[in-house]
Amino acid sequence: MSTIEEEFISTVSHELRTPLTSIRGFSQTLLNSWDKIKDEDKKKFIGIIEEQSNRLIHLVENILSVSKMNAASQVLKEVDVNKNIKKIISLIEAQYKTHTFKLELYSNLPTALLDEDKFQQIMTNLVDNAAKYSESGKTVTVTTEVIENKICIRVEDEGVGIKPEDYSKLFKKFSRLENHLTSKTQGNGLGLYITKQLVENMNGEISFESSKQGTTFNVLFPFYNQEDALKCSQLS
Ligand SMILES: Nc1ncnc2c1ncn2[C@@H]1O[C@H](COP(=O)(O)OP(=O)(O)OP(=O)(O)O)[C@@H](O)[C@H]1O
Ligand SMILES: [Mg+2]
C-alpha cells in the first residue's frame, strides 16, 4: 500500500470513529438509564444520534465517490447543462429554505460532453458549499454562458469568503478551512477535492475568486459538438 493510501485510510478511520463513538455513547446512555433521563434530554440525545448518522452517510457517500472518480469509470455523452442545473437547484433549495437561489441561464446553450451523474455531483458540491458557507437570507446565483468556445458555469455566493492564505488548502482532501460557519456546519472536506478531480477528468477547468463579500467558482467545459464551437466563434 502506498503512503497516500495509508494516510487516506487513517484519516477515514478517524472520521468514521468520531460519529460512531458518539452514536454508541448516546445509545448506551439511553438504554442503560432510560427511566432516569428527562424527556427533553431523551429527545436531545436521539437528535444527536440522527445528526451523527447523517454525517456518517454523507462520509460514506463521499468515500464511494473518491473510489469511483477515476476517468475510467465515467460515461461521456451529450448533456444539457441548464436542465441539470435546474434539477440540482430544486433539490438543494429544499435543504436551504432561508437562502435565495437565482438562475441566470444562457438560452440556446450548446450541449456539453459530460458524464451526467458526475456533472450533477460537481454542481451539488459547489451549490451546497455556496449555501452552507453563507448566512441565511443570502443569495446564491448560478450563471451559464459561452466563453471562448467553452461552456462556463459560475456559482456565486455572498458568503464568508476564503482567505488568501487558505487558497492552497481548498482542493486538498479532508481540509476544512477555518471560518465561523465551518465549525457550525457538517462536512468532511472532501467535496472540493472530488469536484476538482471530476472536472479535470472530463476535460474541464475549475477556478475561483474570493473576497470578504463572497466567493465565485467558475467551471469551464468543452462543447459536445465541434460545430457549435465554430458557430460560436463566428458569432463573437
Ligand atoms: N463557497 C465557499 N465559501 C467559503 N468557504 C468555502 C466555500 N466552499 C468551500 N469553502 C471552504 O473550503 C472547505 C472545503 O470545502 P469542501 O466542499 O471540500 O468540504 P466541506 O464542505 O467542508 O465538506 P464536504 O463537502 O465533504 O461535505 C470548507 O470546509 C470551507 O471551509
Ligand atoms: Mg462541501
Image: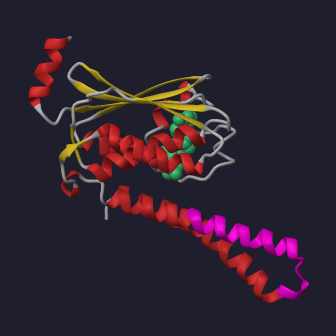
Tell me where residue 88 appears, x and y as whole percent: 43, 47
Q: How many marks?
A: 0
Near-viewer residue (207 or 110): 110
Q: Is residue 126 visible?
A: yes
Bounds of the magenta span? 33-55
Tell me where residue 65 appears, x and y as whole percent: 37, 58
Task: Let me know if residue 41 is in the magenta part.
Answer: yes
Which residue appears at 23% of the width and 26% of the height?
Answer: 150
- Relative to 139, residue 83 above or below: below
Quadrant where the image shows the C terminus: top left
Horizontal side of 167 relative to 68 (left or right) equals: right
- Relative to 129, residue 73 above or below: below
Task: Let me know if residue 61 is in the magenta part.
Answer: no
Magenta region, main secondary structure:
helix
Horizontal side of 179 relative to 5 (left or right) equals: right
Quadrant where the image shows the N terminus: bottom left
Which residue appears at 52% of the width and 28% of the height?
Answer: 215
Which residue appears at 27% of the width and 39% of the height?
Answer: 200
Which quarter of the figure has residue 223? top left
Which residue appears at 12% of the width and 33% of the height?
Answer: 225
Horizontal side of 106 relative to 133 (left or right) equals: left
